[in-house]
Amino acid sequence: MKQNNIILNGIAASSGIAIGKVFILEEDDFLVVKKEIKSSQIKQELNRLKDAMAKTKTELEENQKELNKVLGENYAKIADAHLLILNDPLIKSEVEKIINTGINAEYALHTVVENLSKTFDLMDNDYFRERKHDLLDVAKKVMRNLFGKQRKTLMDLEENSVVIAKTLTPADTVTMKEAMIKGFVTEIGGKTSHTAFVAQSLEIPAVVGLKGIIHQVKQGMPIIVDGNLGLVILDPSKETIENYKREYEIQISNKKELEKFKDLPAVSLDGREVVLGANIENPEEVRSALRHGANAIGLYRSEFMYMSRKTMPTEEEHYQNYSSVAKKMMPYEVIIRTVDLGGDKIARLGLMDIGREANPFMGLRAIRFCLKYPEIFKIQLKGILRAAVHGKIKIMYPMISRISEIKEANKILEQAKEELRREGKKFKEDIEVGVMIEVPSAAIITDLIAKEVDFLSIGTNDLIQYTMAVDRVNSDVAHLYSPMHPAILRLLKNIIDSAHLAGTDVGMCGEMAGDPAYTIVLLGLGLDEFSMSAAQIPKVKKIIRSVSKSDAKDLVEQLLRCSSMQEIDITMKKFKYKQNLF
């Protein structure tokens, strides 16, 4: 008997709902066999490799142009990552070395890629572990050209298709948008994959990391992709399809309703106004921030400038990048977080010899790395200082755990100013400096830290993780990660109250700030600025405009008397029912 409603759980990579029919994008079936070749054939084999790589380079450059056309220059840099891999002299020389021993090009490439893949698997950081898939994408293209196979196209699919694949490239994702494909599901990938980033920008519903999906579907099978929850439903029943169609219509209706709030201030019923900012990581995202009604950039993750390259960004690159954002956001402020990368990434840029750390989340990263290598830090600071002439830029130091780190960072900032003076370059002398509160030690001494800075921003992602001793991406313990734990609520209250006593504004740029479930609580705690992904701004704004600050404050006082999360949950539900907020 046919089974309906087969529900599979993957990773929600891009929100939205897609209802359509399965199209399986088959993987290239390369049977790589080791062949010994004669010494007289080695030159010919090296030329085969050279030709295959040249063809692949042309393909990647075409992809880069397409990404640039559809999403803009900074997303086109995703293709730079693939070109860098292809042009990596180490990879090329390793493959050639094996060929020179009398082995065919296909097997030589396969061997080198397998060895590199194992190295990526050992990396602790999710983002960098995901770069393994970039390597495999490039290798697959070169291998296809070695075998002389044609590239596949998605442009001929029916409009209601949902693509199922082992993996997809960012260029594939752009093609899907043009071909009006409903959504996609992949076996490989995570939230930090380049394909996920592109899908989010193009608003294509996507679920990734669903191993074995290809073997559970058939061509043309009805399918629902729930990119909000990370669910895939195979052979959905008529009732399920109707339910999801209603959900889809509700989402479209809600989206139109929320658009009405875009140009309205984020002010509560009793007149308390807060700042709603956007978290971004490249200049192209400013457009989306403004479109969704942001009146600040509360977090500019500058790490994007260090990705997909072999050399450190120059002062001029920093200046041009930040200037672009500042000009587009005028008259609103832009908070640039100084680079929050670990030493392992910098080591891979070939600048220094840093060993692999057993626990990089508590190791040499963020402000600790910058203070250990001040010249790298200074280059970024000089770029920020110069860019601040063109807008309302502020500097924010990440992962502060003690007062001495702020003082040391500010000394380097003063050195950067002095160098700019000597060089005769214009810069902002009185730039505001703040810090992120994301380490429990900093949260406990917020009263002292607030006296040293112009503003604070709470990074709840790490703060909750460190406080609760919970790795939120570990499926065995992720359920213990909770922003509404009594300890977290008390910690947040201490941070905000301590900052205000010192006359310092405090914002929040962690995921909690963008979750509508916590908006009323944060308003009641007295948060001055909420910063989140741009798409969440209208939702949060609507809630702020539907309650009074005094009622939200009363709710927080009740929550702080609760001793368990069950009590907190009941109290929240009673409040929402009373306020008619369901």
Image (tube, rainbow, N blue to C red):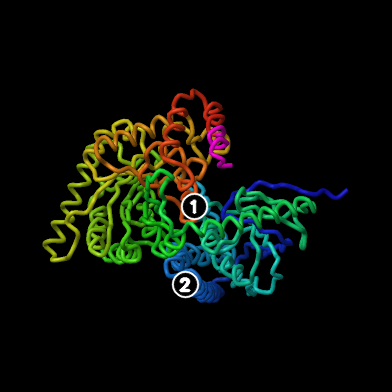
Where, by quadrant of the figure, is residue 420 drawn?
A: bottom left
Residue plotted at (55% across, 57% down):
257
Extreme residue toward the right, this view: 1
The secondary structure making up most of the magenta span is helix
Q: Which of pointers 2 and 1 indicates the residue nearer the eye?
A: 1
- Most foreground residue, 454 or 57: 454
Q: Which residue is mark 1?
A: 536
Of 174 and 559, the residue lying toward us: 559
* Residue 578 on the magenta span: yes
- The crowding category of the residue bearing disc 1, from other C-alpha atoms within 10 Å (few below 14, some 14 to 19, many at least 20), is many
Separation of disc 2 and disc 1 at Cα?
26 Å
Taking the image as shown, residue 176 lies to the left or right of residue 558, namely right
Which residue is at 70% across, 65% downward?
161
In this orientation, does residue 135 appear? no
Using the image, determine if residue 514 lies above or below residue 80: above
Pointer 2 or 1: first along the chain = 2
Check residue 68 in the rendering and tell me which mark sits there, or answer none.
2
Q: Quadrant of residue 500?
A: top left
Q: Is residue 489 left or right of residue 426?
A: right
Name the residue at 72% across, 47% down. Answer: 7
Q: Give the percent coordinates (x, y) of residue 102.
A: 55, 66
SS of the residue at dot 2? helix
Residue appearing at x 18%, y 55% in the figure: 416
Which element is circle 1 on? Answer: helix
Q: Amino acid at mark 2?
A: Asn
Work out whether residue 127 or residue 506 is closer to the camera in this orientation and state it.
506
Q: From which residue to which does the magenta span run?
A: 573-582
Amino acid type for the residue under numbered disc 1: Gln
Furthest toward the front, the residue is 270
